[in-house]
Image (spheres, grey):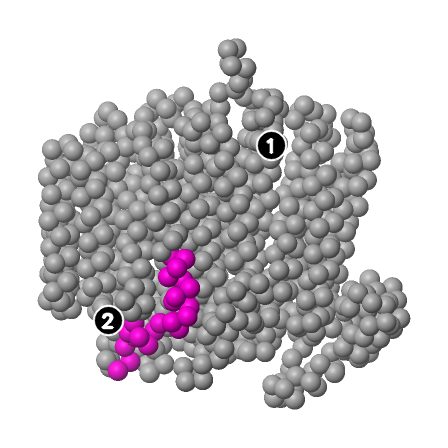
Amino acid sequence: MNELLDPLLLARWQFGLTTVYHFLFVPLTIGLASTAAVFQTAWYRTGKAEYLRITRFFGGIFLINFAMGVVTGIVQEFQFGMNWSEYSRYVGDVFGAPLALEGLLAFFFEATFIGLWIFGWDKLPRGLHLATIWCVAIGSIVSAYFIIAANAFMQNPVGFQINEEKGRAELVDIGALLTNPVALAAFPHTIAASFMVAAGLVISAAAWHLARNQHLDTMRPALKFGLWVMVGSGILTTLFGDQLSLAMVATQPMKMAAAEATYDTVCGADASFSIFTLGTPDGSTELFSIRVPYLLSFLSTHTFDGCVEGINDLQAQYQELFGPGDYTPIIWVTYWSFRWMIGLGLAHVLVAVVGLWLTRKGRLPEQRWIWTIAIWSFPLSLAAMIVGWVFTEMGRQPWIVFSQMFTESAVSPNVTGLEVLISLIAFTLVYGALAVVEVRLVIRAIKKGPPEVGEPDPETGRHEPATTVY
Amino acid sequence: MDLTVLWFWIVAFLFVGYFVLDGFDFGVGMSLPFLGKDDIDRRVLINTIGPVWDLNETWVIVAGAALFAAFPEWYATLFSGFYLALLLILLALIARGVSFEYRHQRPESQWKAWFDRMIIVGSAVPALLWGVAFANIVQGVPLDADHNFTGSLFDLLNPYALLGGLTTLLLFFTHGVVFVSLKTEGELRERARRLAARAGVITIVVAAVFLVWTGLAHGGLWFWILAAVSAVALIAGWLANARGSEGVAFTLLAVTVAAAVFALFASLFPDVMPASNDPANSLTIVNASSSTYTLTVMSWVALVSLPLVLLYQGWTYWVFRKRVTRASIEAAVH
């Protein structure tokens, strides 16, 4: 019973659960806003009805999705104070600033222009209306920058000083905080991955219709767009992910060691990367593994004769630096989440390249299984993104702010286990119920296909966009 | 000016913005069972706030972030201390927000009825609980030497705080109904005007009791001045509504809410969370605030960005200035 009511464990589960849930909507908002902006621009420039229909089709899915992103985001901001008050007191001076900047500079902007875009079709001149969706796209990306800068502080704290008298961290260099090397790599990595998720949705939706040989006029260009974006953003995600792992080795070597489950420091050919391991990956009971020699050395140092520090050596170093304790994250979580992220990510690029080949010069493959693979692009690209964040955050443990504060010291001391249990159950039930509704509505909207837009005005040759109402 | 004082008033301003704007959203949501006779009426009501509820709600996110950044101790004490109350507010805001989106996705009347209920409850709960929370802040709550709240949810549900909650509930309701009369036409507009007149009377009585109680227990000169402004604006707003000047009535009620919230902040100053058990444990603008460097950086950003925010949000309201009619809902595709 006592373990069930451990406020720390419950608060961690709640934060993990609500964050993963919130993050199902974030990459879609970022990626789909830009997707809608691109197609609306194409319509603006060419006047072709297909582009307007594609815009409104993906715009409709974007709208089902965005309210969930907004309301689950409020939970995230409140939770730092509700469940992690000691954290808020200790680093609020530093960590609060990027959140406040995000709100003032990006979030207001995004929220205002979303309303203008949804309801402004018949109220704004066409050019101005087009500008509003670009504002939403830009706002969502700027917003992501501040959030990632805040997160990067937890991974690699910079730009601060400890005020001994007040017993807290204080910001001394906002420039350093906002140009944290981890943020500079994590931001483009995350944005490119968000475009992969949006491309995944576009591919899935288009494949569903093309497999049934319907809506060819709109779904063919949509598929082509999705495949190209998937390839392009997949390559960018990989390149920036590589930069991020260099920054990670430099700042959080334990995370890289945990990603590979390397217990002893290894160099050169021995610094191999295991693609697959059978047995418990704790180094002692490995039964079978497929290994690529030199690859871990290359990933960590960009050289083939580099050395990668092992968990045991780092553990010893940290005990000397920070005192006795266990400084190792949960290895099976980091090991497998790292592999699933990379594996799923690369598989999507491969599928998209093959897809471009199969659909070259207007061809459409007949085999049902090819389309089935394409339809799975969306859930699997989202899964790749989620396991990536699970890796990042679980690999940071036992720290909440690396080298500065332990997660266990950050929890609110006056919130009881029972209270957290109540909120955890409440969030689980509400989020679960809404997930069922959300998924059904998205599938329904996809199956319904792109809306008709009628005939263009005979005088101007332009479509009059319909009024949007709730 | 001392930056902690500046930020105390910026935080006050952001909460004022939130209560003025999302306050009438809550009122519109709560008015569904009173004014929404059929589905078209209910859709008209929801669409009066359709394009703006999200930007209105964003004010609480920015207010919360500003509180976190400028007064981390205040943020930590308040949010961990009022844990279950804030949980209820969050769940209500989730229910309300998704319902706006989901309600019109399917034609079945049962489906719509579900989301109507969620909008009503999701609007009423925060309208009540924000008042309870702020009344408790003004009244003071038990805090230990580390500024951690030592009471429970039931300590927060005291008579004074519940009166505060009832006051915000009624104020937001009346403000929302006046907004409906400003944004609709015909019969609905007339019914909204009559409902606002009736609700306004109760609001005036309850708000008067709350403001006098607050003033006698916690008020200084500035509190009484702002409370007087609030009271005069409320009565003038009621009269304007009775005369049928909807725009004037809406503006005066916005002044009422703004002045009342500023009055509460004025009664706090320079405390931010007074401790009811021992004044030595109180959080003040000095011991709760961030460093001068952080406040300086944020001051620049806030002073540049807030005027722009007001400008583009004001423009949005202007774009959507037209009344929402039954005909426009019936003509729409969905």
Residue picked out by circle 1? A39
Which amino acid type corresponds to the residue marked 1 in the rendered image? Phe
As for residue B282 lying within the magenta part, the answer is yes
Q: Chain of mark 2?
A: B
Quadrant of the rendered image containing residue B331: top left
Quarter where residue B142 is shown: bottom left
**Residue at 19% from the left image edge and 55% from the top image edge:** B260
Residue carrying label 2 = B270
- The residue shown at (23%, 52%) is B258
Q: Is residue A287 magenta?
A: no
Q: Return the chain for callout 1.
A: A
Q: Secondary structure beneath disc 1?
A: helix
Find the magenta span and give its range. Answer: B280-302
**Image coordinates for residue A393, horizontal then vertical, percent:** 61, 66
Give the residue at x 74% y 83%.
Answer: A313
Spot occupied by residue A152 in the image (x, y as percentages of width and height): 58, 65
| The C terminus of chain A, quarter of image | top left
| Amino acid on which the number 2 mark rests in the picture | Pro
Q: Residues within 10 Å of mark 1 (few under 14, many from 20)?
A: many
Q: Is residue A289 above or below residue B56?
A: below
